[in-house]
Amino acid sequence: MLSILKKKRCCGQEDETQSDLERIILVGNPNVGKSVIFNHFSDSYAIVSNYPGTTVSISKGKGRIGGKEYEMIDTPGMYSLLPITEEERVSQSYLFDNDPFVYVHVVDAKNIQRMLPLTLQLIEAEVPLILVLNMMDEATERGIEINASRLEQELGVLVICTTSIKGEGLDKLEEAISKYSFRHVDSKVVYSRGIEYAIESISSLIQDEYGISKRTLAQLLLQNDKVAFDTISQKGEDVAAIKKIIDGTEKEYNNPLNYVLTIERQAFVNDIVENVMTTGKRDVTLTEDVEKSSRTSLRERIDG
Ligand SMILES: Nc1nc2c(ncn2[C@@H]2O[C@H](COP(=O)(O)OP(=O)(O)O)[C@@H](O)[C@H]2O)c(=O)[nH]1
Ligand SMILES: [Mg+2]
């Protein structure tokens, strides 16, 4: 159902009124179809406002799913849980501060190799999660086939295939959300010994509870994320002891820990992708090359 009554409150700050409804939060890279999915489900009203202290806009609306009303939130694009841009920082803060019913991670089915690292990070964060492989039309056009049930087994989270602009698969997403209940999923990534040791040591020092797992928080600290440090400082954690572990780990590795974590995580993604994806018979690059060369030879013939 497309939204008909969009109330746009732009240029203002985030509306602070808290809704009592359970929240569904859409996350993922930019340009994967999050807003198309948001517009499909949020039907009664939607507001666009700036996240406090930023120029980043967030859309919120109410959506009826499986007969129940939820608050839907469309976050700005993010590539990783470790933020670089202001948009990513806002998306990260949603993860820190929220306890939603479910996160819907939307990815571009043509590019799962690039998108699954965030899925693995969300799994490590131990948040409630459904994965949506959107843009299935374009993936199919390129001869990409994804074994969604195998991917579901590999990840331990629900996987729904959609072509959101045509409304395809959104009924399945609606059903998945309405039947969703949180179940703990073990991390799919095991990092090298020094990193795992650091994650374990930092996690055991963290006393308080956060919106994300201690394992994820430890990784953000290892990568010197400012918000993660501010958050644990405010809660009175033993920052000095944590910094000591980080210093020691940094000395063990030749590369920045952010780089090490990214590379090691990608290796797990590559293995998963190899097991679930085939690029089929129709080789796009080849087809494009053939088309290009035939156009060139036609041009040559015309030009004489
Ligand atoms: N071919 C195709 N295009 C899509 C699909 N879903 C979204 N799009 C298009 O992808 C672009 C980005 O969509 P949008 O919802 O704005 O992405 P967002 O940045 O993740 O919110 C838009 O031009 C959409 O029309 C899909 O399933 N198939
Ligand atoms: Mg959007």
Image (cartoon, rainbow, N blue to C red):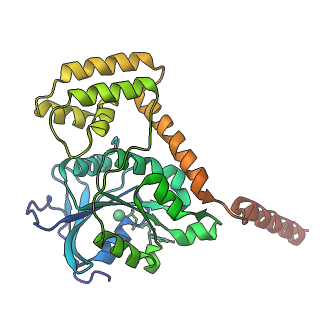
Q: Position of residue 239 (x, y in %)?
A: 19, 24
Q: Position of residue 33 (x, y in %)?
A: 41, 67
Whether 78 is drawn above or below 247: the answer is: below
- The residue lying toward the viewer, choosing from 258 and 265, is 265
Q: Residue at x 33, y 29 (%)?
A: 199
Whether 273 is drawn above or below 205: the answer is: below
- The C terminus lies in quadrant: bottom right
Looking at the image, residue 192 sits to the left or right of residue 245; the answer is: right
- The N terminus lies in quadrant: bottom left
Residue 105 location, quadrant? bottom left
Asked if one can make out residue 219 in the rendered structure from this viewpoint, the answer is: yes
Q: Position of residue 294 (x, y in %)?
A: 82, 67
Looking at the image, residue 118 sits to the left or right of residue 217; the answer is: right
Q: How many marks?
A: 0
Looking at the image, residue 304 sits to the left or right of residue 196; the answer is: right
Whether 87 is drawn above or below 265: the answer is: below
- The residue lying toward the viewer, choosing from 15 and 28, is 28
Q: Position of residue 231 (x, y in %)?
A: 17, 36
Asked if one can make out residue 74 in the rendered structure from this viewpoint, the answer is: no
Residue extending farthest to the right is 304
Tell me which image quadrant ligand 2 sits in: bottom left
Looking at the image, residue 22 sits to the left or right of residue 264; the answer is: left
Q: Residue at x 52, y 55 (%)?
A: 112
Q: Residue at x 43, y 74 (%)?
A: 164
